[in-house]
Image (tube, coloured by chain):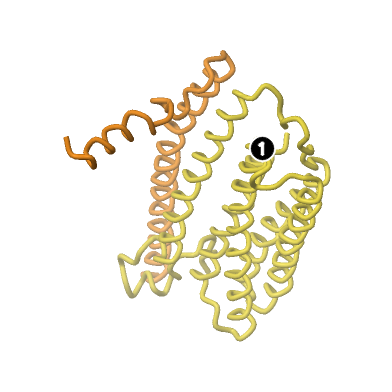
Chain colours: A orange, B yellow
Amino acid sequence: MKPAAAFLALAIVLLPDLASACAVCFSGSAQTRGAFVATTILLTVLPLALVGGFLWWLRARVEEVDQVRGRVREGALR
Amino acid sequence: MVQRRFAGPNPLELVENPRPPVLSHAVLGMLIFVLAEIMFFAGLISAFMIVKSAALEWPPAGQPRLPAQETLVNTGALLLSGVVLAYANRVFKRDRRAARLPFALAILLGGFFVGFQGVEWVALIRQGLTLWSSQHGAFFYLIVGLHGLHAVAALAAMLWAFHRLWVGRLAQSTFASVQVFWSFVVLVWPFLYWRVYL
């Protein structure tokens, strides 16, 4: 084995430190599990609610514009 | 005469153009930006909630408590600025000159909020709460700091819009998009206050 390869192999064995596989699995308490559940619900429901709310608002706005358009046309025909 | 309640095309445009957009491009773009920013803050708050739930003591030992009562006054000023700006937009649709005063008041209240936050930060740094002092400090400056950055950007947009109003060149759609931005800054704050300060 070449010296460089031997040095590299030794470095790979000795240098790494302990690492957690999961960056957020540092606590298994009931409170932390509850926080995980709450934030999962928040991050799941919030985008759906935002997009749904936007579409609902847009639909109401289209209806409002149509109403104004209808009233303007009625006025123009008189 | 048809009463206009929204920042859309006026009735004459509706006669000339039967299918105008129901929403101006400026407002639509700002809404998309705001929806993305809401998710950004939701992610930050989620991370904060998980870290806080795992802590044995919060705030950590040796770290100051956040001034919740003083910030409540500041929160009131921010909410009031949002209400005043909405009122200014209503006035703007009837009389553009009359909208100057409530618009200026909304900017002043927003400026008060940002200034008060700055004073609060100086006091907290003096008490030992820094970005590197603890997770408490790191999350506080990250979340509240990013909100402050949004507030400063929205204030700059309001000042620019106010200048255009002053010289008589402010379009309704521009006013509406600035209002959407400021409303986001105003409405996201009570949630941040509840999670971070209380």
Q: Position of residue B139 (x, y in %)?
A: 61, 41
Residue ID at (27%, 38%): A8
Whether residue A65 can be seen here:
yes
Residue at image point 78% right, 52% down: B120
Question: Is residue B93 in view from this perspective?
Answer: no
- The x and y percentages for residue B77 are 76, 54
Report the residue that reaches farthest toward the top.
A30
Which residue is at the front of the view, A17 or B41? A17
Percent position of residue B124, x then y: 78, 48
For image coordinates 49% across by 50% down, the residue present is B37
Give B122 or A72, whichever is nearer the viewer: B122
User: In the rendered structure, the residue with mark 1 lies on which chain?
Assistant: B
Neighbourhood count class around disc 1 (C-alpha, 10 Å): few under 14, some 14–19, many 20 upward: many
Q: How many marks?
A: 1
In the visual, does B183 lie left or right of B70? left
Which is more toward the observer, B17 or B28?
A: B28
- Mark 1 lies on residue: B136
Does residue B67 appear to the left or right of B7 in the view shown? right
Towards the viewer: B23 or B153: B153
| Quadrant occupied by the C terminus of chain A | bottom left
Quadrant in which residue B179 is drawn:
bottom right
Tag 1: residue type? Answer: His
The residue sitting at 58% across, 74% down in the picture is B161
Q: In the orientation shown, which residue stands out farthest toward the left?
A: A1
Secondary structure beneath dot 1 equals helix
* Rendering quarter of residue A32: top right
Can you give x and y, in whole percent of width and height, for residue B43 in the image?
49, 39
Q: Quadrant of residue A20?
A: top left
Q: Quadrant of the image for the N terminus of chain A?
A: top left
